[in-house]
Amino acid sequence: MEARTFEMEFAKFIERFHEDIRDLFLEDTLHKREILSHYQLAEEMLKELADNVLAEFTVNIDKRTSVETIADKYVKLGIRCFEDGLSFSEMVRVFILLKRHVWLFFQDSNFAGQPFDVRSIVALNNRTTLFFDRAIYYFLVGFEQTQSENPTELESLYNAFVERLRIDLNKPTVD
């Protein structure tokens, strides 16, 4: 079996069972590990993330899918998570757990028991890992981009203090 065909067959398999994988992922993330337990919309957000990744798995691991397509989606997620006050380290852990659940499902299924060439498995692993690495990277780009646009409370206090000093010393404002 050709590696490319194997990758796409696996991706279709993941899409077909994406709800099962998503439910196992949610149970593990929210109830066993209590990740994002402080966030009221955690279940809704994690369900949406898992559905987007798993239901579109053929597109996500396809070599023809542009980096920009992945970048756009996950930069927006990073911005949203920053604005909602979520921890980027917890979110990176979420991505890692989702990838882990994809592979656990693969291992536990009959699909994994089929005779495949080692090169096919390596190619599949590389495509899957590349997608998740890109998703995490662009998530962090969005998170950091928003973070740098919004000064911290300490930075705001410092800027207000410096501005007050300028006014008191009768110095012009420098932008």
Image: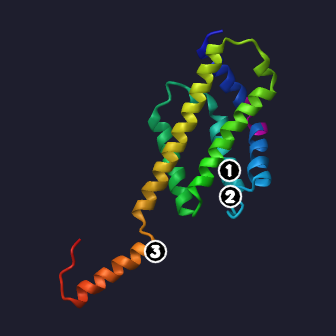
Q: Position of residue 71 (x, y in %)?
A: 47, 41
Q: Earlier in the sequence, mark 1 or mark 2?
A: 2
- Distance, label 1 to label 2, CA atoms, is 9 Å
Q: Residue at x 53, y 62 (%)?
A: 83
- Secondary structure at numbered mark 3: helix
Would residue 73 be seen by someone viewing this image from the given angle?
A: no
- Distance, label 3 to label 1, CA atoms, is 29 Å
Q: On screen, 52 above or below 61?
A: below
Q: Earlier in the sequence, mark 2 or mark 3?
A: 2
- Distance, label 2 to label 3, CA atoms, is 23 Å
Would residue 45 be seen by someone viewing this image from the given angle?
A: yes
Q: Residue tagged by mark 1?
A: 46
Between marks 1 and 2 in the image, the one whose residue lies nearer the viewer: 2
Which residues are drawn in magenta? Answer: 16-20
Q: Residue at x 63, y 54 (%)?
A: 90
Q: Residue tagged by mark 3?
A: 153
Q: Mark 1 touching mark 2, by CB under 8 A?
A: yes
- Secondary structure at numbered mark 2: loop
Q: Give the class, few, some or many, for how many residues have Cα within 10 Å of label 3's Cα (few <14, many ≥20).
A: few
Quadrant in which residue 23 is drawn? top right
**Quadrant that contains the N terminus:** top right
Q: Residue tagged by mark 2?
A: 36
Under mark 1, the amino acid is Leu
Quadrant in which residue 54 is drawn? top right
Between marks 3 and 1 in the image, the one whose residue lies nearer the viewer: 3
Under mark 2, the amino acid is Leu
